[in-house]
Amino acid sequence: MASHARQMPKPNQPGSFLLIDFLPAMQQTTLSSPTPPSIRPAPSFTFKYVARHPLLLVVLLWLVVVTLAATINSSDQARNGRPTDFMAGLQLFWLLMMPLCGLSIGLTLYFRRASANALRARNIVLLYFALLLLFFPAFIYYEILAAKLFFKEEIPPLAIFLRKPNGPECWIDGMVFSAVYVVHASYALWRDAKRRMQALHAARHDNLALRLSLLQGQLEPRFLLGSLDGISDMVRDAERAQAIRALARLSDLLRNALRASQRDWLSVADEIGFLRDYLDLQTLRLGTRLQVQWCLEPNPWSGYICPALLLHQFIEQLIDDGTRDRPDDLALTLGFTLQSGNVSIQVKHSLPTGHRGYGSAALLGPLYATRERLQILYGSAANIHTGMCDDLMCVTFQFPAQEGGDD
């Protein structure tokens, strides 16, 4: 290409022809053509429009490349004291690079429709060598023929095309050809990797949503079975007045459970109300063996949301583990506060005499399940801390305070 560019005619040189020479005839034809009845508005030529049309983007990029090549060649010729016509150089470079532009369009269409198997490294390399054997020799000889036609020189017999082309010029064309292919292949591999990553994220999100729904589905029937068992114990013990009160509490629990089954999120106030009704029901069943204390910070809890039935499985197992087969009473304290943009729920409970830490696997299971729900919904922004505080076991649940509340 470089040798062809150095042979360009000077301005007004006989035998040269320029695209600008045809402009008057084109203008005359345009003026004499009939006016259409309706003129459609031209499409908005914005970056988003070009990005949505990859073939148009390829042509525009090659126009930029050809213009830069013609500008650099014209500047070099002027510095060497051989000024040339810029428009003639632009036409020559565009004529020489038309096969590469067509190659870019073909590669764009191929890679956009290529299957996952075609985008494997082995197949990409095989396609490169196939183009190197078939397209590249034709491109080299096309340059020779195009230059002869451009300068209106005599076209030699076909035997001249069988001779070995100029070595340095062939190497330059080979590097340009390879660069074009590498750019298209790299972009296709990047798009394929991005598409795979998006599919992976979508599958992971669907998997987490399924796991979350399964966890929540396990929670909803648990409290109903436990509450019915407690009410049946009251009926058997002839505590009919308490059983009636327990049924009233159970109706509130059912109302909250119905709301939780229809939504993934409830307000913190609804969570507090559900826990109150559940603990009141358990207090009716257990009497003085269960002592509950509330420490609520004065905040508009109805304006913040949390996962439905977040603490129920843990509280239920805690009461069952703390009152079954142990003589000690269970003291339970629940506190709700806002700390540094997080909702903090602190659960303190007494331990059996001589017992420290969580030794019950049945209690650790609900704790891990609650931790998993929080991690699915909030990621690393949510956490659970456990520790001892004033001879009480303290479990703190923290998650971001998100405004929303009930509709």
Image (cartoon, grey):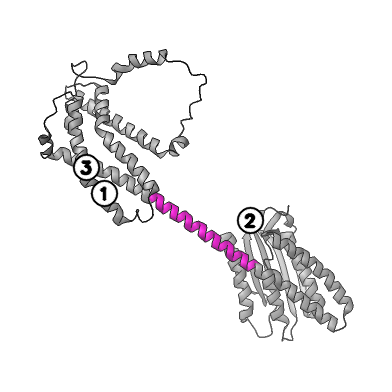
Q: Is mark 2 on a helix, strand or loop?
A: loop
- Which amino acid type corresponds to the residue marked 3 in the rendered image? Phe
Tags 2 and 3 touching, CB below 8 Å = no
Give the distance between the C-alpha atoms of the residues marked 1 and 2, in whole angstroms.
56 Å
Q: Position of residue 373 (x, y in %)?
A: 60, 65
Q: Could you classify mark 2 by the number of other residues whose Cα lies within 10 Å: few (under 14), some (14-19), or many (20 or more)?
A: few
Q: Nearer the viewer, mark 2 or mark 3?
A: 3
Q: Give the range drawn in magenta.
A: 190-216
The reply, left or right, for residue 353 in relation to residue 245 is: left
Mark 2 or mark 3: whose residue is earlier in sequence:
3
Asked whether 193 falls inside the magenta stretch, the response is: yes
Q: Where is residue 164 in the image (x, y as percent from the top left)?
A: 11, 40
- Which amino acid type corresponds to the residue marked 2 in the rendered image? Gly
Q: Where is residue 35 in the image (x, y as percent from the top left)?
A: 47, 16
Mark 1 or mark 2: whose residue is earlier in sequence:
1
The reply, left or right, for residue 187 in relation to residue 337 is: left
Q: Mark 1 points at which residue?
A: 128
Tags 3 and 1 touching, CB below 8 Å = no
The residue at 25%/45% (across/down) is: 178
The residue at 27%/43% (across/down) is: 179
Q: What element carries label 3?
A: helix
State the residue in front, 229 or 49. Answer: 49
Give the distance between the C-alpha atoms of the residues marked 3 and 1, in whole angstroms.
10 Å
